[in-house]
Amino acid sequence: MSRRRTIKGVLHNFLGTYTSRYSDYDGYWLFGILAGENRELKIDLLNPSIGATESTIVAIAVKLAAQKFREQVDKGNLSISCMREARLDITRLPDSVRGAVNGRVCAGYNFRFFARVVSDSGREYDSEMLAFVAPHDPAVESRSKHRGTPCNIPE
């Protein structure tokens, strides 16, 4: 497989795994909790950093993004060294929409997840995903049975 197709596949798979139900905090979907942060989040996937004023949930989102990205790079048999830049931008779109959570219709927002890689040769690759995210509501959500350490990320 060509390096171009491999990088595109890595980005696609990264977005799928990062936005999955397995991205959780204390058994609840990470992005439902993050929706309450009401912000845009930009993450450097190669050198993730967390500002001193960032909330715990933002710090977990940043760490998890870098972890999931590296896992997909490894699965694609690529090296981080072949990438000059790798970024993830998460944007809550402005209009409230209605969507389903566990079979119940509720208000929420569409979130745009946009991942971009610039290779060592300067070529750019990107992938995008939209996902409906309702703000965290333990009365509607089911808690995951595999909860434990938030996102299983070592400190």
Image: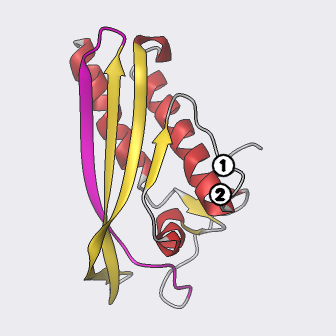
How many C-alpha atoms fall within 10 Å of the one at disc 1: few (<14), some, or many (≥20)?
few
> Disc 1 marks which amino acid?
Gly
Position of residue 114 measured from the top left corner of the image (x, y, whole percent):
31, 46
Q: Nearer the viewer, residue 40 or 82?
A: 40
Query: In the figure, residue 123 lies in which quadrant?
Result: top left
Asked if residue 78 lies left or right of residue 58, the reply is left
Position of residue 28 measured from the top left corner of the image (x, y, whole percent):
57, 70
Of all residues, the one furthest to the top in this rendering is 121
> Disc 2 marks which amino acid?
Glu
- Please say if 49 is above or below 36: above
Asked if residue 23 lies left or right of residue 16, the reply is right
Task: Name the quadrant of the C terminus.
Answer: top right
Query: In the figure, residue 24 lies in which quadrant?
Result: bottom right
> Which residue matches tag 1?
51
Q: Is residue 155 magenta?
A: no
Which residue range is magenta in the image? 120-138
Q: What residue is at 30 percent from the left and 81 percent from the top? A: 100
Asked if residue 152 lies left or right of residue 3, the reply is right
> Which residue matches tag 2?
54
Position of residue 149 measured from the top left corner of the image (x, y, whole percent):
73, 56
Q: What residue is at 58 percent from the left and 37 percent from the top? A: 48
- Please say if 41 is above or below 46: below
Q: Are marks 1 and 2 in contact (CB under 8 Å)?
A: yes
Asked if residue 22 lies left or right of residue 146, the reply is left
**Quick check: can you spot residue 77?**
no
Task: Label 1: state its secondary structure.
Answer: loop
Position of residue 13 measured from the top left corner of the image (x, y, whole percent):
34, 39
